[in-house]
Image (cartoon, coloured by chain):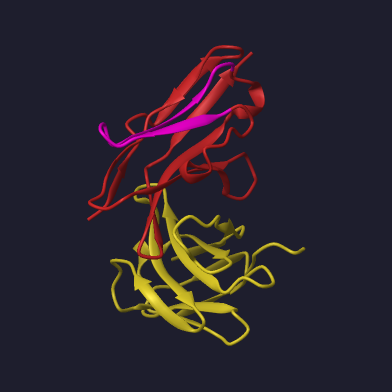
Amino acid sequence: AQRVTQPEKLLSVFKGAPVELKCNYSYSGSPELFWYVQYSRQRLQLLLRHISRESIKGFTADLNKGETSFHLKKPFAQEEDSAMYYCALHSDYKLSFGAGTTVTVRA
Amino acid sequence: KAGVTQTPRYLIKTRGQQVTLSCSPISGHRSVSWYQQTPGQGLQFLFEYFSETQRNKGNFPGRFSGRQFSNSRSEMNVSTLELGDSALYLCASSLGGQMNEKLFFGSGTQLSVL
């Protein structure tokens, strides 16, 4: 069975500092991985997906199959990045979410 | 275009009752999935529908059921409510439910069971 692990429940960084959110997964097949974000009083929304290899709002994530990881990174955090971030794995028409990491960016 | 719409926004029920939640997907989207969100368990998959067919079901008791109509709108039903069913129920839609598709989420229905 698939599993997604986000080891950090809370992450606090200063504005302008780098931020990295960890995500590890276990899955026997070829994973389809995503990062979803929920800003205060907003809906859960897609941030990025590994297949697109894109950078959204300065965030990037690299799939490392050897380490079964999909960490999310941003070199310079902004106050508007404060939110709840979920790593998710898509298989068999369902998303399996990690527990989420709450990021607080301090001025 | 309009986003995913969930009704009602809030519900208060008592133990033993049943409840029906509704979800209208984005126009043109044919896949609808449901998730339960609680502080303790996080986001957990309930079921997914495509063209009125359930393609996957999460690890929930049979009291949780759902269906999808020909216009892609979906409902989920919880019978014999228990206190532990109190949660935010989220609906998400996508074009065809393929593996790398983006899901669009609704605002959710907050269910409180007293």
Q: Foreground: B83 or A30?
A: A30
In the displayed structure, A45 sits above or below A8; it is below
Q: Colour of chain A?
A: red
**Nearest the camera: A13 or B13?**
A13
* A67 falls in the magenta region: yes
Residue B7 in sight: no
State the quadrant of the N terminus of chain A: bottom left
* Residue drawn at (61%, 12%) of the image: A16
Based on the displayed image, in which of its 4 quarters is residue B11 positioned?
A: bottom right
In the image, is residue A86 above or below residue B24? above
At x 77%, y 63%, the residue is: B1
Any magenta on residue B92? no
In this view, the residue in front, B111 or A88, is A88
Residue A58, how many percent across, how many down? 61, 27
Residue B26 visible: yes
Give the percent coordinates (x, y) of residue B105: 58, 58
* The C terminus of chain A sits in image quarter: top right
- The tint chain B carries is yellow
Q: Please name the residue shown 55% across and 78% down the image.
A: B74
Magenta range is A59-76
